[in-house]
Amino acid sequence: MPLPGDYLTLEVGRERVLVIRDEKEELRAFHNVCRHRGSRVVPKSQGNCGHVMRCPFHGWTYSLDGRLKSVPRLQTFEGLDINEHGLVPLELEVWQGLLFIRFEPGGEAVSKKLHTIEERVACYRLADMVSLGEGSISEVRYNWKFFHDVDNEGYHVPSAHPALQELYGRSYRDDFIGEIPVSTGTVDDQPASAWSVARYKSLLPDMEHLPAESRRLWLYFGIFPNAIIFFYPEKAGYYMSLPCGPERTRVVSREYGLPDSSRQVRAAQYLSGRIDTLTSLEDDALVRWLQEAAGTSVFPLDNLADIEAGVLQFHRRLKDKIPVMSRRYPPESGSMADLNGRLQARESS
């Protein structure tokens, strides 16, 4: 979003987000809801709206800083004060070039939450990167927590992901930096039968802006509760889950690379994308099987290896936030919010 008028939108649950760069080149975030009748102020997922945002429903026009600028036939509105009907702002924080939105005010700053990994990722120059095409949005038919149950451990890599195993499986490990899960794997020089893996190994250039230990490293950080930020030698990106229902989840992702990349870097970006696509298809099957198993009478509980510590930590942190999850059986329909509130009050007293 380098230019004034550049914007991005996103849907999170029932909320609609709009992020835009204003005339002073500052980033601002708003609810993408017109103050007249609730239409989307900008209808597309990404674009440039020029010097104003004009609602496509009735033409109410907003400045790039969110102020209501003009209302067609203003005289027909009794007592309408333009100064009191600007777009509703949202909290926005930029970290390493990534944009974080908060719907409810307050809470810990992202910079504080992620300060333990700042030095680790600084060499990648994420804030200097540009988007490698538009983001991806897909919808899957399983619970968002199962999505991360698979993502929070690498125990399954040798069995479930043959391409990843050939790429870096011999060196793969899961660990923590503070409370942040971190997974690493170093691309080795062993022969590979998977076409994309073999070509990636042979074509991956020596990225001179990275320290030696990062030039063949695939690095993943888990951002609780629902996002992953990843760094490869040739690119970086994120993916996150957005719950839409008990068995429905929206997955949003985007990739970035440094501008003016060489042909060899672009080839590596393409090949790592092929590997990631194959991995995501394999993970999709695993998560669907977990979703199916949860409905059986013999779903296994408390049966984790030490190397699955990420799954255990994920659920412990969820239960701290949502204590009703500690119950073995679900509460009666319609009573979950009330029970969860009482459990939270009991734990905080």
Image (cartoon, grey):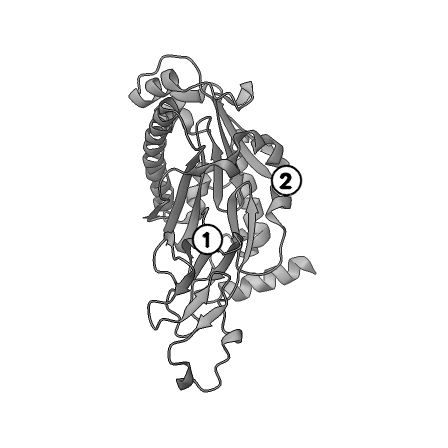
- Indicate the quadrant where residue 258 lies: top left
Quadrant showing the C terminus: bottom right
Q: Is 322 or 128 nearer to us in this picture? A: 128
The residue pinned by badge 2 equals 115
Amino acid carrying mark 2 in the image: His
Graded by Cα atoms within 10 Å as few (under 14), some (14 to 19) or many (20 or more), the crowding at tag 2 reads: few
Q: Position of residue 146 (x, y in %)?
A: 42, 44
Q: Which residue is rendered at x = 53% and y = 24% of the image?
A: 210
The structure residue drawn at horizontal position 46% and vertical position 46%, both measured from the top left corner, is 2
The residue identified by callout 1 is 4
Depth order, front residue of 177/245 = 177
Amino acid at pointer 1: Pro
- Mark 1 secondary-structure assignment: loop
Residue 219 x, y percent position in the rendering: 50, 29
Foreground of the two, 25 or 154: 25
Residue that appears at 52% across and 56% down: 28
Which disc is residue 207 wearing? none
Give the crowd class for mark 1: few <14, some 14-19, many >=20 residues within 10 Å.
many
Q: CA distance from mark 1 to mark 2?
A: 30 Å
* Secondary structure beneath label 2: helix
Earlier residue among tags 1 and 2: 1
Inspect this view and state whether residue 16 appears.
Answer: yes
Compare residues 154 and 292 and report the one nearer the observer.
154
> Which residue occupies the extreme left position in the image?
195
